[in-house]
Image: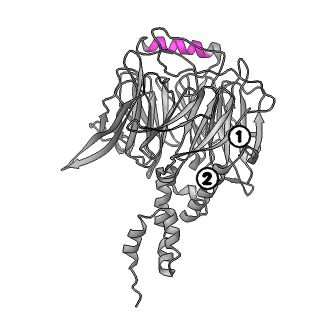
Amino acid sequence: MEFQVPDVPLLKIFSFLDAFSLLQASQVNRCWNRVAENDHLWRNLCLKKWSFCNFSQCLGSLTWKQFFLKQRKQEYRMALAKPEDFTFREASGNLGILGPMAYLSGNDHTVGGQEKSVICTVSSKHVLCTWDVQEGTMIWSSPVQQSSIMHLATLPQMHLAFTVDLEGTVKVWNCQDEDALATLAMPRVCFSLEICLTNDGPFLMVGNSEGDIYTLTVPELRGVSKVNAFKYSVDLLHCSPDRKWIFASGTHQNILPMVFLTECLLKPSEGNSPLCLSIPFSSCCRACWAPRKTSRVTVMYRRGSFKKTGFTTFDLMAKRTGGRTDIQAHQVATFLLPVHMESPIWMGVGDGNMIVFESGPYLFLFTISGHLLQRFEDHQRTISNLWVDSVHILTTSMDDSLHLYMWEDEGRYPYLKSCCHLEHIGSDLAPSCFQKFDVFDVDFFEFNLLGFDQLFHSFAKNTHIFVGVKFSIINYVPLSTDFVFSVGSYVSKAICDNMSIVCVVSRIRESSILVMYSLHM
């Protein structure tokens, strides 16, 4: 007689399976097929792989299983893509210098029955624009703003864009109407911007020059909380994939990064400080949360007179004892790069046990303990920008090329797969003269806030260069004593989704060129 396992324990067993094993189990019999179709199982698989899946609007009309299989199919197509599989579009002319950009389109975004990729770009002409990547056309532009836009963030699930300008004005745009949905003038210059999408709705977090972190409602921009984290500017704000933690830091040598419990910022208790913990590593220059180990954060820092670059990884935990909650940080691993290795500017993380960064023309993959796993040599000249998400890695180089890599599932060997290489970006473009921008080392140059503001207001006004954004002139690099402004050549950068790659090619004393590649569907 055939024995049938009850649905509840079977569902529990199936929750430990990966997608391939779950599909195999569904072929055993009708009972297993019915349980394996459970939406909760497929939702958990989506949450594990893609951090944006905690918001049900990304599904559209699909079930979680359909959504998972659709995403995996698109990723597979992108991983196998060759240069001839892309349709090329180029936007040039009087665009100005293009700064930060981000995708506005979410999953299952369609126009006229066709899937579309839509991006937002910010220009030195003080405008925010949206582009149809497949058509290569601008579809919306904001009015000219009074001040340069420094930071950009998007919320694809609600089709919203958020900007902060040089004067500290925060705006929310639906990228359809002429006017912003909401505007808020901050009292100080803003240095960081982060959107946090929770079960209670979306919130915007803004870090300013005096070390304050503001939490605002979306889209109204009403104040929820304000906390002073540091004496210096909040340069980094990162929300963990599960939205439980907020990482905050500045790049000043005397600042220790802090981790806040998100709930305490969203629901402040009168008279009580929000729960937070300082991480004992100063001189932080980058930080990333692990996409699949959601309470693990890796920090890149620079130490000593020779500015040695190191990485340290912590696991965070909120422990409740009696009626009190405490945050604990456990250092999992740390290591320093060899002295002879050129210090990286960019970094990303994989499954929580791997770190990827650029050094010269090479892309390196290390374990969090410092063991070299892979070195990629797909560029002839220095890598100028590195962009990483939970699926893709994009590098752009001074040789006018970009390269696409993709993470292997579940951190399996070979960990990172080299995919498509696109050379000679643009049509009839002369090679650009790219270089990494040197600015100043804060260890050797200190000035008061007023002097900082006046200096950068003047510099931005006279050179039309973005200030305070990752793709701009502000990259902290090891210098000896002086600070140097290297102007005249600009960094290229790239972002992608599962259907397109978008790259900015910047030229000396000329407007940028927006290059859009879309996969043949």
Callout 1 touching callout 2 (CB < 8 Å): no
Total number of numbered labels? 2
Q: Secondary structure at mark 2?
A: helix
Which of the two marks, 1 or 2, is nearer to us in this view?
A: 2
Residue at figure coordinates x 40%, y 15% from the top left: 443
Q: Residue at x 50, y 47 (%)?
A: 415
Where is residue 105 drawn, in percent x and y?
A: 63, 47
Q: Position of residue 316 (x, y in %)?
A: 32, 43
Does 357 appear above or below 341?
below
Q: Earlier in the sequence, mark 1 or mark 2?
A: 2
Three-letter residue code for mark 2: Glu
Horizontal and vertical percent position of residue 49: 50, 53
Magenta region's main secondary structure?
Answer: helix
- Relative horizontal placement of residue 170, taking residue 500 as reference (left or right): left
- Tell me the CA gap for discs 1 and 2: 22 Å
Q: Residue at x 67, y 39 (%)?
A: 421
Picture coordinates of residue 57, whole percent (x, y): 56, 56
- Three-letter amino acid code at the position of disc 1: Trp
Which residue matches tag 1?
A: 131
Stretch in magenta: 449-460
Front-most of residues 145 and 63: 63
Q: In what quadrant of the picture does the N terminus appear?
A: bottom left
Residue 458 counted in the magenta span:
yes
Q: Residues within 10 Å of mark 1 (few under 14, many from 20)?
A: many
Q: Secondary structure at mark 1?
A: strand
Query: Residue 431 sits in which quadrant?
Result: top right
In the image, residue 364 lies in the stretch drawn in magenta: no
462 on left or right of 265: right
Q: Which residue is mark 2?
A: 75
Asked if residue 452 shows in the view, the reply is yes
